[in-house]
Amino acid sequence: MTENVSLPERLEATFLTSSPDLKRCPPIEGAEVAFAGRSNAGKSSVLNQLTGNRRTAKVSKTPGRTQLLNFFDVRTGGRLVDLPGYGYAKAGKEAQKSWQSAVNHYLSYRDALTGIVLVMDIRHPNQSFDQEMLNWAEASELPIHVLLNKADKLSFGAQKQAVAKIQNLYKTHPTATFQGFSAARGQGKPELMGKLLDWLATPIDLEI
């Protein structure tokens, strides 16, 4: 655990590769943490806040621009995986179906996956995709950490209320944890950093 360890200010991560499907994902070398979320929830901005590099993940005003599984090597070990966003996107239905199928296969069959960070817009949490992800994590017994992003858009009291509401909604969920977060201001970054470092340090059986 990382409670008594001094946390770094940022994760040093470098882009490794993009994969259109599970078959073409890079060979497993250690634990992987996937970042999921609806289009425009701010997933790319969260990754950029974590790494201290605005160019780590492409941020676009057009939702749904991430259409591949993007892998980033973390210098201290493990990888971050930026998954294509769900929801509306300026792409054809067949293209959306294709990359969302790739996400499903990655989540179901990637042996290196040790946890999921699910990014939600704190103003519009628990959409149908969010519910599906939380239910899937429960059924798969996989840790899932929910970031209620864009917390800076609400007052402090409204932030606490939003986090408490969703915590209560999923109080029986065995693997879910929740926090408020602001990718714009770095609010909640130490808590998320601690969670990620724990997950990335998970031993993976490379013989699988």
Image (spheres, helix red, strand yellow):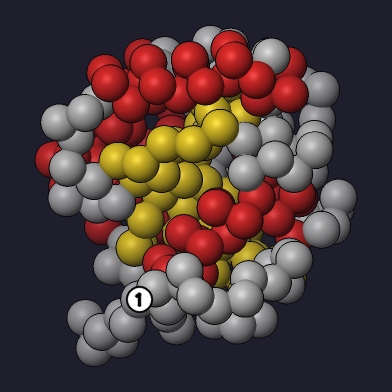
Task: Classify the position of the N terminus by image quarter.
Answer: bottom left
- What secondary structure is marked by label 1? loop
Q: Quarter of the image holding residue 150?
A: top right
Q: In this view, does 43 lie above or below 114?
A: above
Q: Which residue is drawn at the image coordinates 84% and 57% (left, top)?
A: 53
Q: Which residue is drawn at the image coordinates 45% and 83% (left, top)?
A: 29
Task: Classify the position of the C terminus by image quarter.
Answer: bottom left
Q: Which residue is drawn at the image coordinates 75% and 66% (left, top)?
A: 9
In x, y percent, where is residue 140? Answer: 17, 47
Q: Quarter of the image holding residue 121?
A: top right
Looking at the rendered structure, the kind of residue marked 1 is Thr
Q: Mark 1 points at which residue?
A: 202
Label 1 crowd bin: few (<14), some (14–19), many (20+), radius 10 Å: some
Q: Is 148 left or right of 116, judged from the image as shown?
A: right
- Nearest to the observer: residue 165 or residue 206: 165
- Nearest to the observer: residue 45 or residue 91: 45
Q: Is 160 left or right of 67, judged from the image as shown?
A: left
In x, y percent, where is residue 91? Answer: 64, 21
- Can residue 106 be seen in the rendering of this structure? no
Q: Is residue 198 above or below residue 58?
A: below
Q: Residue furthest right?
A: 54
Q: Is 164 left or right of 190, judged from the image as shown?
A: left
In x, y percent, where is residue 202? Answer: 35, 76
- Nearest to the observer: residue 8 or residue 103: 8
In x, y percent, where is residue 49? Answer: 75, 49
Q: Residue furthest bottom?
A: 207
Q: Quarter of the image holding residue 188?
A: top right
Instruction: Please give the count of numbered marks on the rendered protein.
Output: 1
Q: Which residue is drawn at the image coordinates 63% and 66% (left, top)?
A: 72
Q: In this view, does 196 lie above or below 168?
A: below
- Can residue 50 be seen in the rendering of this structure? yes
